[in-house]
Amino acid sequence: MVCHYGTDLKEMVETVERYTHHGKVADYIPALSKANPTDVGIAIFDGHDTCFSEGQHRKLFTLQSISKILTLALALMDHGEEVVFSKVGMEPTGDPFNSIAKLESHIPSKPLNPMINAGALAVSSLIKGSSNEEKLDRLLQFVRELSGNQSITYNAEVAKSEFDTADLNRSLSYFMKQHGVINGDVDVLLDFYTKQCAIEVDCEDLAKIGFALAHHGEHPDKNYSIIPFEIARLVKTFMVTCGMYNASGEFAIRVGIPAKSGVSGGIVGAVPGGIGIGLYGPALDDKGNSIAGMKLLELLSAKYHLSIF
């Protein structure tokens, strides 16, 4: 369909494809190392139809850290702010997403925010359910409702690959268990967490999730709210302050769109009151963000004045 964003998206994707050669896929998770580093895809959703898409926008990839914003929303819906933020803080960190350093130096010893691995593990431990199967089913139904795609599930191969190589996340979990941030069996938590990260989507799914967040958690047909207004606001705020790992500050200056990335190469963007954006580009920069996706968002933001600042 003809769209007011113009016909230059194809040119933008072709422009950023050359940046993929400066990045590398996340090979520390064996299943993710199979991705094609030159892939780039994007979809933009305006609430009526997928306004436009380009590149590998229908290729499936796993949410990875993008799942952190979804489990945060679900945990807040399950327990409320007081309980959730007794376990995890609200402050950005300049450390890598998998660092243990702040846990050791911060008193009380709780993760600084829900977007780093330690914080996401703490949040995941709060999801209601009598078993991991029930918790995962609740999360999957939540993602399906936000995206409008009832076929979304998780990639068992990626989940197993992550579980088998999750020694650092185990270390973070045992440290937090020692300090009372989490309870229960660490491997049971890791089983849920790795399956959460392995939920598979494409760019159009992500764009629709981004649109829902952009519109205060409302379903695209605007008949009902999937995420309460205040929780959607909190999630978007974390996306701005912590969503792009330890590149969040520079990203806010250069792009200025609430966004969350994952090491599979996915990025979800939510322009408040506007569009939802889903991107895929598995070649990552040294911070763990899609190198082509970051550049593509920068071009989009500049051309269409999408920055919230």
Image (cartoon, grey):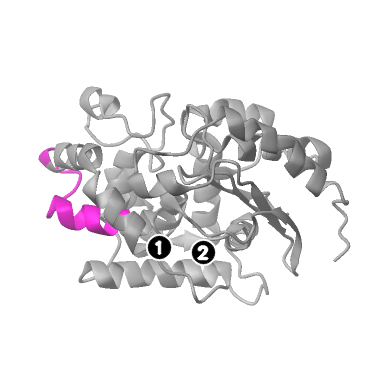
Which numbered marker is on residue 227?
Answer: 2
Q: For residue 176, which quarter of the picture?
A: top left
Neighbourhood count class around disc 2 (C-alpha, 10 Å): few under 14, some 14–19, many 20 upward:
many
Is 17 in front, or is 207?
17
- Residue 117, position as x, y percentages in the image: 33, 41
Lower position in the chain sequence, tag 1 or tag 2: 1
- Residue 89, position as x, y percentages in the image: 35, 38
- At x 70%, y 36%, the residue is 16
Q: Hey, what amino acid is under mark 1?
A: Met
Q: Is residue 54 above or below residue 133?
A: above
Q: Is residue 206 above or below residue 150?
A: above
The mark tally for this picture is 2
Pointers 1 and 2 in contact (CB under 8 A)? yes
Q: For residue 149, which quarter of the picture?
A: bottom right
User: In the image, which residues are magenta?
Assistant: 178-194
- Cα distance in 3D space between marks 1 and 2: 8 Å
Q: Is residue 218 above or below residue 177?
A: below
Query: Which residue is tagged 1?
Result: 77
Q: Is disc 1 placed on a helix, strand or loop?
A: helix
Q: Is disc 2 placed on a helix, strand or loop?
A: loop
Residue 80 visible? The answer is no
Q: Hey, what amino acid is under mark 2?
A: Ile
Tell me if 85 is positioned left or right of 125 in this view.
right
